[in-house]
Image (cartoon, grey):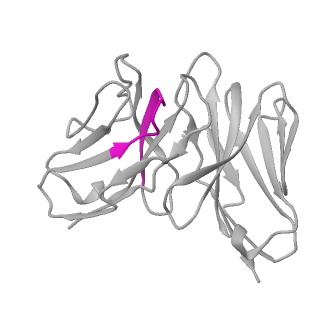
Amino acid sequence: SQQGEEDPQALSIQEGENATMNCSYKTSINNLQWYRQNSGRGLVHLILIRSNEREKHSGRLRVTLDTSKKSSSLLITASRAADTASYFCATDASGGSYIPTFGRGTSLIVHP
Amino acid sequence: GAGVSQSPSNKVTEKGKDVELRCDPISGHTALYWYRQRLGQGLEFLIYFQGNSAPDKSGLPSDRFSAERTGESVSTLTIQRTQQEDSAVYLCASSRLAGVNEQFFGPGTRLTVL
């Protein structure tokens, strides 16, 4: 089973609205990363948040991490049509694993 | 500088043929990963290389799959006797350090097995 699972699987919003995606995981982690993928091709790294951090910002992106609930959220504020993509979280299990585990992703559509 | 490149970008082959996919990581990146992504699915880990250490092959789905990497340079993923279920996008990623750090992905190779 997947270590990280994104929710919802699909999200459709209007330009200017905020988009929130969630990621839940099962085991303790060292860090959690969010990636974006356009058109089923290569992924682009967005943010890495470490297990001792609770919140990080990057431009219009805000990521939170709640290790007690084993969950993370990605908020995109003031969305744009160009934000249309699939968003994945990737976690690495604590204990020295060098292999991140990706969820199935959230497909975001932003309508102009 | 140049990012991760992969070739070919698309490959159509007949069932039973062998295919070889290539990945050129970012220069100086010690870690290299191969993933498979089926349509509408997440990334499935295949194999991980770290410098000159023995690769982690735990994700390879069958003995038809193999991969090589010479030092910290090019890697090739070979699929022998391809099957229709091998159809997917094969993604390569590299990262600067050992351990889980930001991964830089190539554009992928879309493999179609007829």
Asked whether residue B12 is drawn in magenta, I would say no
Image spot of residue A34 (x, y percent): 69, 46
Above or below — where is A49 with respect to A86?
A: above
Along the horizontal axis of the image, is B45 left or right of B54?
right
Image spot of residue A81 (x, y percent): 73, 76
Above or below — where is A46 with respect to A106?
A: above
Image spot of residue A104 (x, y percent): 58, 52
Magenta span: helix, strand or loop, mainly?
A: strand
> Residue placed at 57% from the left, 23% from the top?
B99
> Residue placed at 88% from the left, 39% from the top?
A55
Quarter of the figure that contains the N terminus of chain A: top right
Along the horizontal axis of the image, is B7 left or right of B3?
left
Magenta range: B23-37
> Residue placed at 37% from the left, 16% from the top?
B53
Quarter of the figure that contains the C terminus of chain A: bottom right
Asked whether residue B33 is drawn in magenta, I would say yes
Image spot of residue B48 (x, y percent): 41, 30
Q: Nearer the viewer, residue B71 or A50?
A: B71
Q: Nearer the viewer, residue A1 or A49?
A: A49
Asked where in the image residue B45 lies, by quadrant, the reply is top left
